[in-house]
């Protein structure tokens, strides 16, 4: 299976070199694609230096901070345009263990969509009480309002069969922040029921600062309301 692993970066210079090395160690001879939004800390320069000796590493360097959702759309289009069989997405901050990559790749042989879950048996999250509460409320809202039949709807540790991505109308996905994760999944479940959750241990970032803020939380809530209305409209039709 020809796989590309996509990672969006903004100020991840402390993490990115080791992350790419670990991705290669767990998924050897597979492409790694970095979407960097002109990180002020020099993440792009670190990647450029790595690319000199790494034939499996690619970077799309964007002129500024254009949003997490649009970065993932770029990854999806790259996977389709370059005839990959599958796309795996993950965070750059080691909250997602690279050692789980072979598990995702194996599940993609039988499923269209795979997601690492904190909220099924065997899954763990190292968030504190406040972040855990926010996460669980967000996932509950995605299940109830968007009709997503999964326990985990918000993490970016995901695998897509490219044939599934070709069915999704990416131009209909309007969110561009962290709410993109829920909205993309809302569109995925319109096209397949071959979904797989597997347990992961989710740790808080190793280096750097979290990019989730109150504005993102409000936008996520508004996205859920919009998806709820869209779902009702489709049922009536």
Image (cartoon, helix red, strand yellow):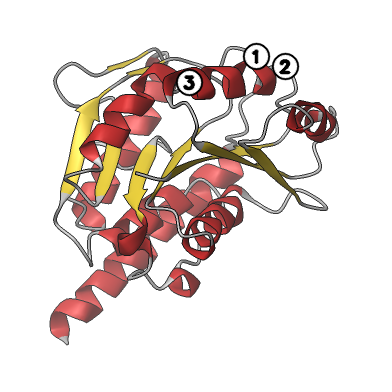
Residue hosting label 1: 207
Element type where label 1 sits in the image: loop
- The numbered mark at residue 118 is none
**Percent position (x, y) of residue 104?**
30, 33
Q: Measured from the top left, where is residue 94 in percent x and y? A: 52, 19
> Between disc 3 and disc 2, whose residue precedes?
2
* Kind of element beneath mark 3: loop
> Which element type, helix, strand or loop, lies under badge 2?
loop
Residues marked 3 and 2 touching at CB (< 8 Å): no
At 51% from the left and 49% from the top, the residue drawn is 218
Q: Is residue 120 left or right of residue 40?
A: left
Q: Nearer the viewer, mark 1 or mark 2?
A: 2
The residue that disc 3 covers is 95
113 to 203, vertically: above or below: below
For the C terminus, which image quadrant?
bottom left
Q: Which residue corresponds to the image point at 27% horizontal and 41% vertical from the top-left?
A: 114
Q: Would you say the residues marked 1 and 2 are in contact, meaning their CB atoms lie under 8 Å apart?
A: yes
Give coordinates of residue 99: x percent, y percent: 39, 17
Q: Crowding near pointer 1: few (<14 within 10 Å), some, many (20+)? A: some
Regarding residue 73, the answer to whether it shows in the image is yes
Q: Relative to the observer, which residue lies in front, 123 or 15? A: 15
Q: Earlier in the sequence, mark 1 or mark 3?
A: 3
Name the disc covering residue 14, or none: 2
**How far, Cα to Cα, is label 3 from label 2?**
14 Å
Q: CA distance from mark 1 to mark 2?
A: 7 Å
Left or right of 15 in this view: 31: left
Which picture quadrant has residue 165? Answer: bottom left
Tell me if mark 3 has few (under 14), some (14-19) or many (20+) residues whose alpha carbon lies within 10 angstroms of its own: some
Asked whether the viewer can see residue 150, the reply is: no
For marks 1 and 3, give the CA distance. Answer: 10 Å
């Amino acid at each position: 299976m020809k796989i590309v692993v996509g990672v969006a970066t903004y100020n991840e210079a402390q993490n990115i070199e080791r992350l790419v090395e670990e991705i290669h160690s767990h998924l050897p001879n597979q492409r790694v694609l970095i979407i960097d939004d002109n990180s002020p800390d020099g993440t792009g320069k670190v990647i450029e230096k790595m690319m000199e000796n790494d034939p499996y590493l690619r970077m799309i360097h964007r002129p500024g901070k254009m949003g997490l959702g649009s970065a993932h759309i770029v990854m999806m289009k790259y996977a389709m345009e370059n005839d990959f069989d599958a796309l795996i997405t993950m965070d750059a901050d080691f909250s997602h263990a690279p050692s789980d990559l072979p598990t995702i790749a194996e599940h993609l042989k039988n499923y269209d969509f795979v997601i690492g879950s904190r909220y099924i048996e065997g899954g763990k999250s190292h968030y504190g009480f406040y972040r855990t509460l926010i996460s669980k409320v967000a996932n509950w809202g995605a299940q109830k309002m968007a009709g997503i039949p999964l326990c985990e709807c918000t993490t970016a540790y995901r695998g897509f069969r490219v044939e599934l991505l070709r069915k999704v109308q990416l131009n209909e996905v309007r969110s561009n922040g962290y709410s993109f994760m829920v909205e993309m999944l809302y569109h995925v479940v319109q096209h397949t029921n071959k979904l797989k959750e597997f347990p992961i241990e989710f740790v808080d970032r190793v280096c750097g600062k979290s990019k989730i803020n109150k504005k993102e939380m409000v936008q996520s809530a508004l996205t859920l309301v919009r998806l709820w209305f869209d779902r009702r409209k489709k049922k009536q039709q």
